[in-house]
């Protein structure tokens, strides 16, 4: 690693949505850790928006805006963090800068530091999905989100039932919002305290609906009039997206059933042994998939035939109406991934290959509710390498390039590994990204909760 010190910062808890729903514990100073009174609450006011009064439990991920580190969940509150001490230094509210009620914990960053994200807004006309652009750098040291703008707003297909989304895709020229049929009933959620129901009761999977890909041109904010449809799918994390020969290639982790989200409740998470196995067995597995969208659909585009002419692609895109293209995916794996329970928490060599053609991605295999293996996928042949050890549960693999790397997989993989065995402590695992062989472990003499997203800071 040269002269750089190795520092991995991870956030621990549950998925973004569940964090938002349940205000779970975290390890960094926020109002929630200082007080037990914070509750996830949605309130209706006479303002034009539909404000959330959320927890500040920003426990999903570390993110960067204008070069600064923040911890983020999916509400409108983030915390700026000192990367040396990990102390929170400033509470930052998206709503102070733009009219959104939150933003995802998965922004995308361009090479110059410009950052894109998405967040919802609610008005009497219904719910909107907003594409957010944060400038690349600060004009003053104390700045946070000044200069942030909304690139465009997309109305929800169902006015009062926007889709839940955890992330989105970004290529060099486009943002792609995936409107999946996991629906949030705003009325039910807003009144859940009155009706003494859980927020979860306002969230549902509707397999009668298609998944819709909305393509937004980044330089202009123009939303494509062509809607790309796919069968109902559930996706939390995108892998990569890039443009090639007039097509937009989108790789993501997806499953055929969005009901799984309801199973991550506290009653199930308190189970163990066979009872917990039963919960896992009800869940649909998540696999890496590729969709290929033809970017130009005009009067010359034929109907009812596959428009994809990329060599070796088995994805299909068929024009079925003037502004509708029906897409089917290509599996980005072989049969061997079935044995490892599918793959989630995908990572790539983001700095050099995000928005570009690429060969490798990394992720966790899921033979249980938490990941129990690390997987490297070579897209040339869909060949896997696997790291696993019985009783050890690795977190999201973070790819860190070697300072002088010339190859896409030249570097290391970092993963925080936890175990339920009392005699083994948590450690940071370091793998050679090329061979997937273990290079070493940094043992931490305390138990760290199972974490989801982290980042590598090469300046600390
Ligand atoms: Fe996530």
Image (cartoon, rainbow, N blue to C red):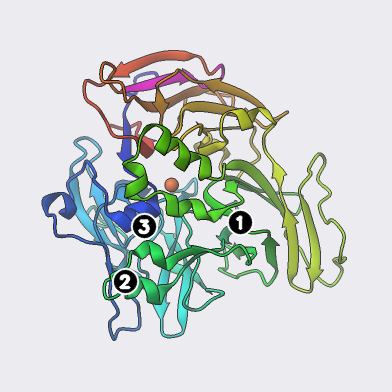
Q: Position of residue 435 (x, y in %)?
A: 56, 16
Mark number, residue 439: none
N-terminal of the two: label 3 or label 2? Answer: 3
Element class at badge 3: loop
Label 1: how many Cα within 10 Å (few below 14, some 14–19, many 20+)? some
Which is in the foreground here, disc 3 or disc 2? 2
Label 3: how many Cα within 10 Å (few below 14, some 14–19, many 20+)? many
Quickly name the residue at label 3.
74
Q: Position of residue 74 (x, y in %)?
A: 36, 57
Which is in the foreground here, disc 2 or disc 1? 2
Mark number, residue 173: 1
Q: Which residue is nearer to you in this view: 406 or 307?
A: 307
N-terminal of the two: label 2 or label 1? Answer: 1
Please identify the quarter of the rendering in which residue 227 is found.
bottom right
Element class at badge 1: loop
Q: Is mark 2 within 8 Å of ligand 1?
A: no
Label 2: how many Cα within 10 Å (few below 14, some 14–19, many 20+)? some
Q: Position of residue 381 (x, y in %)?
A: 73, 28
Q: Which residue is nearer to you in this view: 271 or 311?
A: 271
The answer for how far apart the CA atoms under marks 2 and 1 are is 40 Å
- Vertical comparison of 329 with 418: above or below: below
Mark number, residue 192: 2
Query: Which residue is farthest left?
Result: 34
Task: Identify which residue is drawn at 57% across, 59% down.
Answer: 178
Q: Which residue is nearer to you in this view: 136 or 118?
A: 118
Main SS of the magenta segment? strand
Using the rendered image of the protein, determine whether residue 317 is visible from the camera's viewpoint.
Answer: yes
Q: Which stretch appears magenta?
A: 427-435
Residue 228 appears left or right of 273: right
């Amino acid at each position: 690693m040269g002269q750089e010190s190795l520092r991995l910062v991870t956030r621990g808890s549950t998925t973004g949505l569940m964090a938002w729903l349940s205000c779970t514990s975290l390890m960094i100073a926020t109002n929630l850790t200082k007080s037990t009174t914070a509750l996830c609450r949605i309130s209706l006011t006479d303002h034009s928006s539909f404000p959330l009064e959320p927890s500040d439990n920003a426990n999903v991920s570390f993110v960067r805006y204008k070069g600064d580190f923040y911890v983020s969940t999916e509400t409108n509150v983030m915390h700026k963090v000192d990367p040396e001490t990990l102390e929170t230094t400033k509470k930052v509210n998206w709503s102070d800068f733009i009219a959104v009620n939150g933003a995802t914990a998965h922004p995308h960053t361009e090479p110059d530091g410009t950052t894109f994200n998405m967040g919802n807004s609610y008005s009497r006309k219904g719910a909107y999905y907003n594409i957010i652009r944060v400038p690349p750098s600060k004009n003053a040291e104390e700045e946070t989100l000044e200069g942030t703008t909304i690139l465009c707003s997309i109305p929800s297909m169902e006015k009062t039932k926007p889709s839940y989304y955890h992330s989105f895709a970004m290529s060099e020229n486009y943002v792609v919002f995936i409107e999946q049929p996991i629906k949030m009933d705003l009325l039910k959620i807003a009144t859940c305290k009155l009706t003494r129901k859980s927020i979860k009761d306002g969230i549902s999977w509707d397999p009668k609906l298609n998944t819709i890909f909305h393509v937004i041109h980044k330089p202009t904010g123009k939303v494509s009039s062509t809607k790309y449809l796919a069968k109902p799918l559930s996706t939390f994390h995108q892998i990569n997206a890039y443009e090639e020969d007039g097509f937009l290639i989108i790789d993501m982790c997806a499953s055929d059933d969005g009901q799984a989200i309801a199973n991550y409740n506290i009653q199930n998470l308190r189970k163990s042994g066979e009872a917990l196995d039963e919960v896992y067995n009800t869940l649909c597995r998540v696999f890496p998939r590729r969709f290929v969208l033809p970017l130009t659909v005009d009067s010359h585009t034929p109907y009812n035939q596959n428009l994809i002419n990329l060599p070796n692609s088995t994805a299909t895109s068929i024009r079925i109406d003037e502004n509708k293209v029906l897409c089917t995916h290509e599996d980005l794996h072989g049969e061997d991934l079935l044995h490892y329970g599918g793959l989630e928490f995908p990572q790539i060599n983001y700095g050099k290959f995000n928005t570009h053609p690429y060969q490798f991605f990394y992720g966790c295999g899921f033979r249980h509710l938490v990941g129990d293996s690390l997987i490297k996928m070579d897209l040339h042949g869909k060949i896997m390498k696997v790291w696993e050890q019985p009783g050890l549960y690795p977190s999201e693999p973070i790819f860190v390039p070697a300072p002088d790397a010339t190859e896409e997989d030249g570097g290391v993989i970092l993963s925080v590994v936890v175990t339920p065995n009392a005699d083994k402590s948590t450690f940071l695992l370091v793998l050679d990204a090329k061979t997937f062989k273990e290079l070493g472990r940094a043992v931490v003499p305390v138990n760290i909760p199972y974490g989801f997203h982290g980042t590598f800071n090469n300046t600390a």
